[in-house]
Amino acid sequence: MSLSFLLNPTSVAIFGASQNPEKIGGRPIRFMKEMGYSGRIYPINPVRESVQDLPCYPDLDALPEVPQAAIIAVAKERVLETLHRCAERGVKACVVMASGFGEAGEDGRQAEEEMRAIAASSGMRIVGPNSQGLADFNTGAILSFSTMFIEEPPEAGPVACISQSGAMSVVPYGLLRQRGIGVGHCHATGNDADVSVSELAAEVVLDPKVKLCILYLETLQDPANLALAAERARVRGVPIIALKSGRSPDGQRAAASHTGAIATEDRVIDAFLERHGIWRADGTEAMVQAAELYLQGWNPTGKRIAVVSNSGATCVLSADAAERYGLDLAPLAPQTEEAIRDVLPDFAASQNPIDITAALLTDSGLFGKVLPKVGADPNIDILMIGIPVSGKGYDFERFAQDTADFVQAFGKPVVLAAPQRFVREAFARKGIPTFETEDGAIRALAQFVDHIALIRNAIGGPVRPVVEAGNGRTTLDEFASLAQVAGKGVRVPQQKICTTVEEAQNFLTGCPDGIVLKANSPQIPHKSEHGLVRVGLRTPEEVARHFSEIEAKLEEMDVAFEGVLSAEMLSSGHELVVGGHLDPVFGPVVVVGDGGIAVEAMPDNCLLMPPFTQQDVAAALSRLRIGPLFDGVRGGKGLCAEAVFEAARGVAELLSAGNVLAVDINPLITTTDGATAADALLEVRA
Amino acid sequence: MSLSFLLNPTSVAIFGASQNPEKIGGRPIRFMKEMGYSGRIYPINPVRESVQDLPCYPDLDALPEVPQAAIIAVAKERVLETLHRCAERGVKACVVMASGFGEAGEDGRQAEEEMRAIAASSGMRIVGPNSQGLADFNTGAILSFSTMFIEEPPEAGPVACISQSGAMSVVPYGLLRQRGIGVGHCHATGNDADVSVSELAAEVVLDPKVKLCILYLETLQDPANLALAAERARVRGVPIIALKSGRSPDGQRAAASHTGAIATEDRVIDAFLERHGIWRADGTEAMVQAAELYLQGWNPTGKRIAVVSNSGATCVLSADAAERYGLDLAPLAPQTEEAIRDVLPDFAASQNPIDITAALLTDSGLFGKVLPKVGADPNIDILMIGIPVSGKGYDFERFAQDTADFVQAFGKPVVLAAPQRFVREAFARKGIPTFETEDGAIRALAQFVDHIALIRNAIGGPVRPVVEAGNGRTTLDEFASLAQVAGKGVRVPQQKICTTVEEAQNFLTGCPDGIVLKANSPQIPHKSEHGLVRVGLRTPEEVARHFSEIEAKLEEMDVAFEGVLSAEMLSSGHELVVGGHLDPVFGPVVVVGDGGIAVEAMPDNCLLMPPFTQQDVAAALSRLRIGPLFDGVRGGKGLCAEAVFEAARGVAELLSAGNVLAVDINPLITTTDGATAADALLEVRA
């Protein structure tokens, strides 16, 4: 694959090579020499004979061969001409370090457009501009000028960090290296004019040494490659953690009144990452906090946690933390409790959480006696050991060995919480992930088991083709919108456009529960606020009066009269919303949730990416605040989740054709038996 | 005060004194000798002449004086007799270390009862039993056997840790000491038979050296002393952080159908702590994470944060974190932006968050130029500096000095986020609180400013007298309950108990909007589930039919017929709940929130402790999910918060008399103009 020339090139040329190993054009040469790069390094600098004890060449033509990779460390103004020459000569891949391009303004954006053109026409791949560079510590190909590799010396290992930002490539690198974890890849791609973080990730996860992949993204314009990376990673068993920043401003923007706006960009990204089994970290800590757990090869099948501690307080606090982070403090199997009761003193707790008490001081073997019982318990998936106090009189080396034996025998994930460093170090020497507090330990454990479950349940699949953004959009009236929705199998009320009072009165005769009269114009989206919705009309006189009032109101508002929408009264039910829109990058997204005024004032809805199953929709509904309504409250029957799924599928089908841009069914009147779209609004291409 | 004999006694006797400095009866002697205790130490042990080079005495009578304090390190069986002898001889205070009392069963509970009796009759104060002991590092009175003081050597300082649990007294101690923070007090009180954590805290916060007080509580049976401690602490400017464990099981228990149950114990504790300005930590990390900030003497007046970093990524991540933890990333004043634009390069960001970019490499003075502008900005209360990457070429000592100058000049709180240890150390040397990540830095900063605001807004006041738990309780019927509620000024519907159809038909004539008929029996709390509520009756015929049906249904259910409750139909409104109960420890608590079926299935309510103002109720309502309804949605008028306050005040008044145990107004039909109690249920003493 073409990106391998960036990670393992046989030769690298450096334009702007510097004798000074602290300069941007000098550092990569220094790094490659120090870090065992076995390929050929060709400094290019017209004013020098040699650079850092290597022969230096005046230009590309003077090299003894065409280099596979080139580092472009020249001034911004000379980048494009250098790229053209590299492409012409057959260089396979370049890294452009200069900044001042797309991030600086229109000129820069045009220059990036030209880079993409060079890449497309020549096949040469370009990383950057504004890239800190790539570093593969397995091959020693350090095409990077990061200072972090001096401060925190590298050690090739199982983690890969890939980021647009230079800082956020080396921050997780630094935090992991400080904890003694090896990092094999540390790449910063910059503005992603050609090669994106996602595409590079799709290459890196194929490296057999990589066991965990950490991404930092500022934009996500290349979801197809991220889906591919996730697919490959799942095949290889490599978890991917992504920190996508800018959640807050994106999440706030545009709280407009239809579901297209509710389905904000940021929630689309949540749904996309979840679909592909990628864990979304919410900050720097979550990128690295569970790293040790990912590297053990553990494969937990559930989130039922046991806690064993020599302190009752730690037991209680761990129970609180388990609930806080969504783990289940499961009851032990009866035979386990009995077996533990046999080995613990009378005043100790043989229930989960298991408080072995200060008796540990007189019997250092208590962990070794208790842990195998917990390991054999079919009700327990994971374990936390809490040792808040240790020291003289405590044989913590033995506790660590007993814990290592537990892992060896049962393969169940285990973490230690201990505030004292020497206790943590004893456990770390046995390969156990360690934390200062029960809070940190359980937070990391919860992330790990939730992420493994996310990967196991990932739907994956290719990204749906992106729809060309059309020029214009237009809104259909309610009658036409409901007809479209009905065409996809969603139940709608019996309805008719009536241009005369008599027509409406005739319509009433077929509706024993009465009718509703509404204005029917795309010019008036919020009809009820203008008094243009009249409900519960049961007599011909009522129909005549309200019909005339609506007609008069429309005239007053200067809206052309094209009839009044008459619809049968629906029996009451819970008002839901089902809607969706076409995201320009990700394609169709669908929103389901609480409807009516709740949509804006008290939003309680969630986003789904098609295709989805009835089970997916039911699971999404159950996570909402209104979730209990689908189970039934006070012993009653629940709302019909199947009907909500049918409506959501109908919306997805409308959007998948490409000419419907947004759909809003609000309210979808939902009962225990079904659901009916009482109002709908479609936006379509003009 | 009597507890000063525990913290600064002139003499200490040790019952069960041991020559072995690693034994429970030996360690306190070793600690006092090593840690500068200036009083007299009297080992008591009938089988030894000397203990750890001190003269040893056979019993209390042999001592040259009556000791002010005594450590009771004898076996469980000999504790009571020893306490009796101490009390008789005039010892002022004892610490009982043996375990196996209240935590072990009924015998132990009786022994604790006897300890309380000894304390009450003699005036001698007793800490424990099951106490790890008290340690005051200022006076050197270490009446404790903790091993932690060996592993992490003490240094007297501004933090006090007070806990029931031994482990949770030394865990925060250890975490703070590892960070170089001095801890002056480290006390573990055990079972709190006499002296409670709260009472000890009320003494410790008077120590002029104490600047931060950290509590760990497993029970909170002594709120009056905690209120006193908080009062004194507020006067002295000492923040109190409390970790009250057991949140999860308490919070889950008893999800019964009336508000007495909704107002769970744990939420009462939340409300109590908030009222007294005590920060509730949710785990070990939150106990200590912001310690450095509390010790600076900072007094922030708002939560508007500025972020300055040399990395754009850190700027974006900090904005996300600020939102996550509820801080306001405020816009800078225009003059500040202009001033910053003047000193930063063109491509840097002069808006908040301020990205000074890698230009820092060429101008090490950039922090020094930018920070004074931020300091002078009236829109900014607090500051985070993020340096994700530093090292060679970065003059981070100067950055630290510039930051210290900022603090000196403006007194605004500032924290550093930097993953590299040497950067953190440079700032720490200048007294700046430092964190590895922006997430940790902003989380701590948010806790600090929120806590200071909590203290500033604390209502405080004494704890209301505890009501004797009566023997029996009885439920009033709806008519009587509504009458009681109406008596406190809450609006109720026009209503009447009608024993005949004719009476009900007569009642109808006075109700133009129709009437409701309901069964009226305390035996049937969920009337509507039994079809015993008939609404919207407008004709004498309807009234007659439904009256007879209710009568028949009651007969079928074998409930004595005492008439049917007739009430006027209310115009529609939002269904709220207002209720409350008498907590046995804290007195009256009141609940307000969303009503109807939402109460159980989708709870959205909060708890208030009387007395409260209209402003308090409005603030509580605004924090609920339904909060926006009180502001008005879609341009409409909001629900009447004043009427909800009147109802809540009425409930508080009913409860304060002492014979009403629980009140449940559900629904309180609330409109933009007022609120009416459509149903109510009172529980009163039998």
Image (tube, coloured by chain):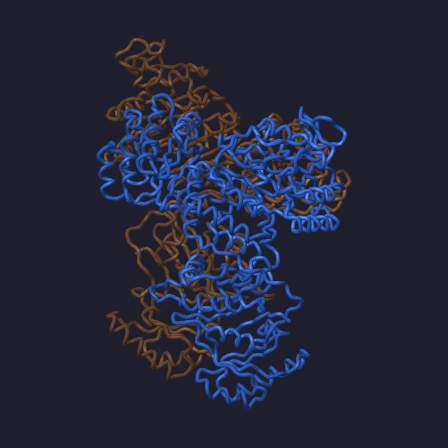
Chain colours: A brown, B blue
Q: Quadrant of residue A60?
A: top left
Closest to the observer: A465 or A397?
A397
Q: Quadrant of residue A411?
A: top right
Can residue A129 be seen here?
Answer: no
- Residue ID at (55%, 91%): B502
Residue B141: x, y in percent? 58, 34
A374 versus A634 height, above or below: above
Q: Is residue B107 left or right of residue B427?
A: right
Q: Quadrant of the N terminus of chain B?
A: top right
Q: Is residue A371 left or right of residue A81?
A: right
Residue B265: x, y in percent? 58, 56
Residue B163: x, y in percent? 58, 42
Closest to the observer: B129 or B43?
B43
Q: Is residue A161 left or right of residue B394?
A: right
In this view, the residue farthest toward the front is B64
A657 versus B646 height, above or below: above
Residue B198: x, y in percent? 56, 47
Q: Is residue A583 left or right of residue A160?
A: left
A518 versus B122 height, above or below: below
How many labels, in total? 0
Can residue B640 be seen here?
Answer: yes
- Residue ID at (72%, 41%): B82
Q: Quadrant of the C terminus of chain B?
A: bottom right
Closest to the observer: A46 or B527?
B527
Closest to the observer: A346 or B511?
A346
